[in-house]
Amino acid sequence: MKRLLLIPALLAVTTLGACTNMNTTQQRTLSGGAIGAGTGAVVGAMTGGCVSCGAVVGGAVGAAGGYVYDQMNK
């Protein structure tokens, strides 16, 4: 049982370690994409549509929004 918990923990640490030393544009694009993907998945589930399609579209729109926000606030 402990080995099964070790794999997700290592994956989380590896993924979060890749986010170090990012500039503000990269941070805002990434966070916009993550928020958009989560929102798109929830909206897709609530409307009875395709959850993964909502996550992809929401992630793309969120990433674009994060990038545009960063460029306008420089």
Image (cartoon, grey):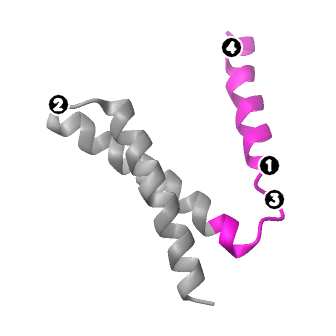
Give the residue number, with chain letter if any, for mark 4: 4
Q: CA distance from mark 2 to mark 3?
A: 37 Å
Q: Are marks 2 and 1 in contact (CB under 8 Å)?
A: no
* The C terminus, quarter of image: bottom right
Magenta segment range? 1-27
Residue at (52% x, 59% y) in the render? 63
Q: Quadrant of the N terminus?
A: top right
User: What residue is shown with label 2?
Assistant: 48
> Residue 31, image x and y in percent?
56, 60
Q: Secondary structure at mark 2?
A: loop
Task: Check disc 3: other Cα within 10 Å, few if <14, some if 14-19, many if 20+.
Answer: few
- First in sequence: mark 2 vs mark 1: 1
Estimate the x, y position of residue 56 in percent, counting from the top left: 43, 41
Q: Which residue is mark 3?
A: 20
Mark earlier in primary sequence (2, 3): 3
Q: Nearer the viewer, residue 47 or 4?
A: 47
Q: Which SS type dominates the magenta stretch?
A: helix
Residue drawn 44% across and 47% down? Answer: 37
- For the point 74% across and 47% down, the residue is 16
The image quadrant that residue 5 belongs to is top right
Q: Is residue 9 magenta?
A: yes
Coordinates of residue 19 in the picture (x, y in percent): 76, 55
Q: Earlier in the sequence, mark 3 or mark 4?
A: 4
Label 2 CA crowd tier, 10 Å (few <14, some 14–19, many 20+): few
Q: Are marks 4 and 2 in contact (CB under 8 Å)?
A: no
- Mark closest to the chain's N terminus, 4 or 2: 4
Q: Alpha carbon of mark 1 to alpha carbon of mark 4: how far?
A: 23 Å
How far apart in space, not on screen, are marks 4 and 2 (Cα)? 32 Å
